Amino acid sequence: MKKVAIVGVGHTKFGRLNDKGLMDLLCEASLEAIEDSNTTNKDFDSVYVGAMSPGAFNQLSGIASALVDKLSLLPAAADHIKNGPASGGSAVKAGFQAITSGMSDLVLVVGGEKMTHITTPGYVTSNVATLTHPEAERRHGVSLPSLAGLLTRAYLEKYDAKLKWISDIAIKNHYNGALNPKAHFQRTIEDFMKSAIQKGKGNWDDVYDFLKDDKTNPIIADPLRLFHICPISDGAAALILCNADKAKEYSEAPILISGIGQATDTHIVYEREDITILKALRICSEQAYKMAKKTPNDIDVAELHDAFEILEAVQSEDIGFFKKGEGAKAAHEGLTEIGGKIPINPSGGLKARGHPLGATGVAQVVELVWQLRGEAGKRQVDGAETGITCNFGGFGNNILSILVERI
Amino acid sequence: MKKVAIVGVGHTKFGRLNDKGLMDLLCEASLEAIEDSNTTNKDFDSVYVGAMSPGAFNQLSGIASALVDKLSLLPAAADHIKNGPASGGSAVKAGFQAITSGMSDLVLVVGGEKMTHITTPGYVTSNVATLTHPEAERRHGVSLPSLAGLLTRAYLEKYDAKLKWISDIAIKNHYNGALNPKAHFQRTIEDFMKSAIQKGKGNWDDVYDFLKDDKTNPIIADPLRLFHICPISDGAAALILCNADKAKEYSEAPILISGIGQATDTHIVYEREDITILKALRICSEQAYKMAKKTPNDIDVAELHDAFEILEAVQSEDIGFFKKGEGAKAAHEGLTEIGGKIPINPSGGLKARGHPLGATGVAQVVELVWQLRGEAGKRQVDGAETGITCNFGGFGNNILSILVERI
């Protein structure tokens, strides 16, 4: 199989971006990636766009066709790839296959979503809830947050874990996000607490008290509170992929995509043997490790899909970093901090970098590229040479894992 | 590059299918294709679903993830591919690349759409209109039918062609559809005329008079009338693709995908040098011919994208069968009938087989497989060995062409 290199990356600021539309964001990330690589418009064969719901959120169909024209990349082939909140990861895989198939030499992959302009209450979350099973789940009011709440309860009970440890993941990710100028939130939870105290909204002894306050941190899906759940964000991220043989033409520091995997699990969560096991992640990460000839021990940094903070704990186990049931405790003990045994989400993760659905799977890879190039600034993981992602479609029923390393 | 074979095909009835949902249709076509091939559920690596707007039409996201579970193909990778009315063709290309990349050995590709249950007036056409440019076109009321009307006017004037010739394409396609048990409409236009006369709705001397009657065939987008435009249909179609080296394991009569191309053109139709030239089709069909080492003279049968009958005329030129400006006349002269120089749309095309958006690009290939296997019944093109498609995304700004031949 041909080898695929990343020779350019782009990443807009994530957050509430009131003055930009979806196409603006896709263009901004794409142009930054093109600028970051030594390419010209005429070189591109294919463009893949990952986005979950641009029809519902932005009244835009055919966004890939529109983007390729707006970027003056005509007549490059263009397709829109959808896999719920893993649309970005699936777009990366599509770009990878375009090159390994021999059909394309140079590919632009961009993921993005624009949601914060929507003011109808519940519109975004109702749209996301269309990922659940229509008869067995959605009809009964089951949404993704409620499944995450159930997973948290099951995990805490089965593994004798503490909700405080799940909070520690949010605390760590907000700390990391505060070091990432592209993140949606650039404040630590201590910063949020101090700000609330200044505004006279309360008085807490420490950050755990703040996180238990029903007014500042209400329960969303018991036992998960607001700070255990990622925000609704706008943003886009982009990658330039090429045949690794030609990588040095386009970049001085190309990064190799050396493993990629994707697997599915039951649509109805209830049908899984054990809700606390992400079978699809076990399979797809094993595919990625096998393709790259690596093991979890080889990984220096990971970007996992913490749409809900429980997910980071569970994923850190099923991707092979910790034994089953020990992920939350490991986070509590600091093993997943920058400088820890295996730094997870130095970007701030979905919790603090934000989660513009289709952007996330691409942004995870962009963060790893920055880490592997040594360009991650204050959040740099020293000497990182190998990284892996988990991008999560639906509620764990379609997961991708992408493994990257220095050439 | 690895070679890719089609070893199974499935195709639901197209039409107003009141008793079935989108997932039912996707399953039915998929199971028929699996049945048609000598495969087992455990063999599949990947599933690609082509559908334009299942979110807007069916409140379903993550349809690929859901389908792979419903068909018991877990843990196969699953993605949803969107390219407007060319979503089916793009899904075929994605499946093709999954195999040529070496990542998959056996792939299910299924395209489908379910629309006729929608009763809100204008909902479907407004959704399709989101393919046009939001500022330069849609804002001013430009929809796909209106662009087709403009194209027809420009074509008739520039090439001194007659609207009657465009009607002849509809007459031919309804004639072919009457021979296709899967088609949405299985009546010739003469049948429609006789039925109207029986109901006392009018009295016409011949079919051309019937087609000029404002009540039975009203103008939709001048000069195009109802019978110049495809219907809104439900349906799905499926293909099983595999590495051609293993094709004989799965099928006694595998068909090769020997060429595939995709190209884009300006989003804003006004920006094209000549509205009557489909530049993207010229480029993508040239890619397909080149990959297959064929020329237009080698083609025995074609399935083109006649969402509006003018498009079949224009496409028959830009895909290389007729000189520019001679496509409509060629249809009028019978050259594109079954038994003619180059039979086009023996299936009935989008006009009579119907146009369940995401299904169409897959259904075109299914029809060619039936033709090449000699299984097309009353509409069989004698001795067909090589066929080609045109699948049209947006208004010609993203086109695929797929070339198939007997192994």
Image (spheres, coloured by chain):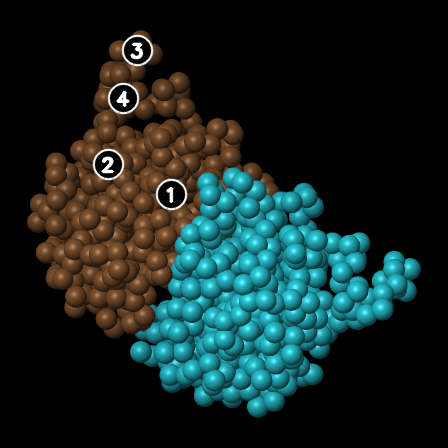
Chain colours: A cyan, B brown
Q: Earlier in the sequence, mark 4 or mark 1?
A: 1
Between marks 3 and 1, how big is the CA–CA gap? 37 Å
Q: Please, what secondary structure does the residue beneath circle 3 have?
A: loop
Mark drawn on residue B182: 2
Q: Residue furthest top?
A: B200
- Which residue is tagged 1? B23
Between marks 2 and 3, how big is the CA–CA gap? 26 Å
- Which residue is tagged 3? B199
* Letter of the chain that mark 2 sits on in the rendering: B
* Letter of the chain that mark 4 sits on in the rendering: B
Do badges 2 and 4 share one subunit? yes
Q: Earlier in the sequence, mark 3 or mark 1?
A: 1
Q: Earlier in the sequence, mark 2 or mark 1?
A: 1
State whether residue A214 appears in this view.
yes
Labelled pair 4, 1 in contact (Cβ < 8 Å): no
Q: Earlier in the sequence, mark 2 or mark 4?
A: 2
Labelled pair 2, 3 in contact (Cβ < 8 Å): no
Q: Please, what secondary structure does the residue beneath circle 4 have?
A: helix
* Rendered view: B340 above or below A333: above
- Identified at 60% across, 77% down, the residue is A330
x and y percentages locating residue B307 in the rendered image? 36, 40
Residue A195 shown left or right of residue A6 in the figure? right
Residue A217 shown left or right of residue A282 in the figure? right
Between marks 2 and 4, how big is the CA–CA gap? 18 Å
Do badges 4 and 1 share one subunit? yes
* Letter of the chain that mark 1 sits on in the rendering: B
| In this view, the mark in front (4 or 1) | 1
Do badges 2 and 1 share one subunit? yes
* Rendered view: A217 above or below B310: below
